[in-house]
Amino acid sequence: MSDTPPRRVILDTDPGVDDALALLYLRARPDLRLLAITTVFGNADVETTTRNALWLRARLGLTTPVHRGAAAPLSRPRGPSPVHVHGDNGLGDIDLGDLDLPAADAGVAHQKIVELIRAHPGAVELVAIGPLTNLALALRAAPDIARLVAGVTIMGGAFGRRGRAGNVTPFAEANFHNDPEAASEVLGAAWPITLVPLDVTLSCVWSDAAAQSLAARDGNLGAFAYAVSRRYAQAYGRHEGLDGCVLHDVAALISLTAPDLFTPDQAQVLVSLSGDRAGQTSRVGASPSIRVCLEVDGDGLAAHFQQTLGSAVSS
């Protein structure tokens, strides 16, 4: 067993089916210590994403604080929720049952991000798998966190490699399209960023057969992982012709735990803010602070995810 202490993680999230799979992965990793779950609008309104985070905390047996965050973008109206992908309840329309859920924990999401980074200087990994509004608000409130955070890992953006330029418009990925101004401010800050864009996440597919195998091994969390991902997988089957579901948010976490699966490049990234191209990302030169993942061993990542969950579903 390693003597290395677990890495402290704040997960900024908009649950979301793939967010639920990301939490399952976190639960299965003893080398990651989840300090807080901060919620944001995105895959549903923030009331629903916060409810889903609280439900997932209870369902997965976690004790992590859940802090509600931004309900809308920094400076534009919130767009419609992608119910055709994540369902009306944001979790693939699975039955959420009658769990008696508490209110979110005290403290606004962006303020808790600031507090935790300041409380553990150089030791917090901030992982953002939804729109970046909470991160932008945290930076506005406390610019010093940029030099105090250990790292910032973001699932977002798209650069058009292999034709992967966007998933909500021809140009933009959903998280950046939901709040382009926030994405621009976050990518413009001088903190160490690893960007995991659509270009690589679309190569990370958890097959239906793998999901079924996990469910057969364990009737609790394995069955949950299978059930929560079914509508999501069906959407990818209809729109992308895939046999399975894409592990967008899981890929961001795995870039922390298995970085050798990715090929990164240092780049400055700009975000378009207006017109039809709002949320579009472009690489415009080298940057010492942004690592853009350009390639991934997608099959290896999916196998790593399956092995990790398989070792933990019965725990």
Image (cartoon, helix red, strand yellow):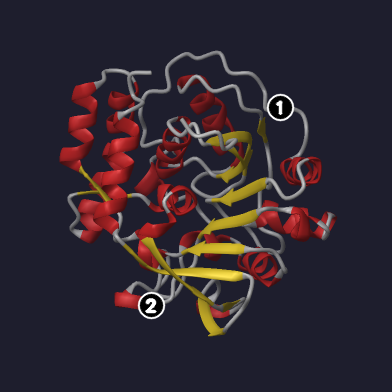
Please tell me in which quadrant of the rendered image residue 14 appears.
top right
Say if 192 sits above or below 54 in the image.
below
Drawn side of residue 275 relative to residue 21, left or right: right
Instruction: Specify whether 144 is left or right of 17.
Output: right
- The residue identified by callout 1 is 105
Residue 167 seen in this snapshot: no
Helix, strand or loop under label 1: loop
Question: Percent from the top left, x then y, of residue 228?
Answer: 34, 33
Q: Residue at left 57%, top 51%?
A: 128
Name the mark on residue 293: none
Residue 229's spot in the image, x, y percent? Answer: 31, 38
When asked about the image quadrant of residue 63, the answer is top right
Local crowd size for mark 2, using a 10 Å CA cut-off: few (<14), some (14–19), many (≥20)? some
Lateral position of residue 290 relative to residue 94, left or right: right
Residue that protrudes farthest toward the bottom in the picture: 285
Pick the residue in front: 45 or 261. Answer: 261
Number of marks? 2
Q: Decide: is 116 above or below 290.
A: above
According to the picture, the residue beneath numbered tag 2 turns out to be 160
Label 1 to label 2: alpha-carbon separation: 40 Å
Q: Residue at x 50, y 40 (%)?
A: 15
Helix, strand or loop for disc 2: loop
Residue 216: give x, y in percent of width and height.
18, 24
Tell me which numbered mark, 1 or 2, is placed earlier along the sequence. Answer: 1
**Residue appearing at x 58%, y 18% in the figure:** 101
Nearest the viewer among 180 and 93 is: 180
Q: Disc 2 marks which amino acid? A: Gly
Tell me which residue sits at (47%, 53%) in the image: 252
If the image is split into quadrants, where does the C terminus sit?
top left
The percent position of residue 177, horizontal first and vertical second, equals 53, 65
Say what amino acid the circle numbered 1 marks.
Answer: Asp
Is residue 102 in sight in this rendering? yes
